[in-house]
Amino acid sequence: MSLAAVIYDEGEPIDALFAQVRAALEARGQRVGGVTQTPCAETIYAVHIDSGRTFDLMQNLGACATGCRLDSGALAEVAGLLAQSLAQKPDLLLISRFGRVEAEGGGFVAEIGAAALAGQPTLIGVARKRADDWRAYAGEFACELPCDAAAVLAWRESLPQP
């Protein structure tokens, strides 16, 4: 299956795993595209691999605000760049997360679906607390991998090479 989710537990280094997988594939001459995530103390940054552009995904709503801090405009811009990455047909498309927004039908869900339809090798991070949402979305069209670089690289090697 060309669509795979790394199911990870809270505290597991999913972002470091994605960086390790990317480095290993690039060292083999493969091209990796998509979006990674860099959590920081007060915010979350999305990094578009292809352009190097970084986006702050969280809004500062002020000291007393209690609403959702996710910046939907920034998320939409990153989704557009992710679509551009998919169009470039990389050897592996990384998608930082399938989270609450995707479970509700937004975020990167259209790009994930397009990647699956295209047969594009795609790796997505899914927190264990969102695993049921992921399974409801992806069904039998995706496999699940542990948070382990060797397992991820073995999965990618098992797919047809471009």
Image (cartoon, rainbow, N blue to C red):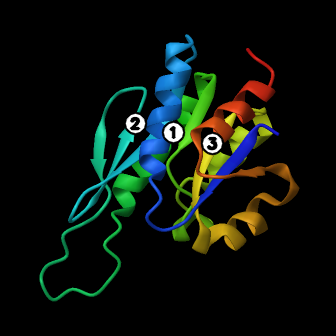
| Extreme residue in the right direction | 140
Badge 1 element: helix
- At 30% from the left and 35% from the top, the residue drawn is 53
Q: How many other residues sit within 10 Å of disc 2, few (<14), some (14-19) or many (≥20)?
A: many
Q: Is residue 104 visible?
A: no
Q: Of discs 3 and 1, which sits in the foreground?
A: 3
Kind of residue sitting beneath label 1: Leu
Is 82 displayed left or right of 55 in the figure? right
| Extreme residue in the left direction | 63
Disc 2 versus disc 3: distance between alpha carbons?
15 Å
The percent position of residue 136, horizontal first and vertical second, equals 77, 69
> Looking at this view, is 57 or 156 the one in front?
156
The percent position of residue 27, horizontal first and vertical second, equals 50, 15
Contact flag, marks 2 and 1 (Cβ < 8 Å): yes
Badge 3 element: strand
Counting residues from the start of the chain, the first of labels 3 and 1 encountered is 1
Counting residues from the start of the chain, the first of labels 2 and 1 encountered is 2
Using the image, determine if residue 104 lies above or below residue 152: below
Kind of residue sitting beneath label 2: His
Kind of residue sitting beneath label 3: Leu
Q: Which residue is mark 2?
A: 48
Contact flag, marks 2 and 3 (Cβ < 8 Å): no
| Extreme residue in the top direction | 29
Q: How many other residues sit within 10 Å of disc 1, few (<14), some (14-19) or many (≥20)?
A: many
Q: Which residue is mark 1?
A: 82
Q: Which residue is mark 3?
A: 123
Q: How many other residues sit within 10 Å of disc 3, few (<14), some (14-19) or many (≥20)?
A: many
Disc 2 versus disc 1: distance between alpha carbons?
7 Å
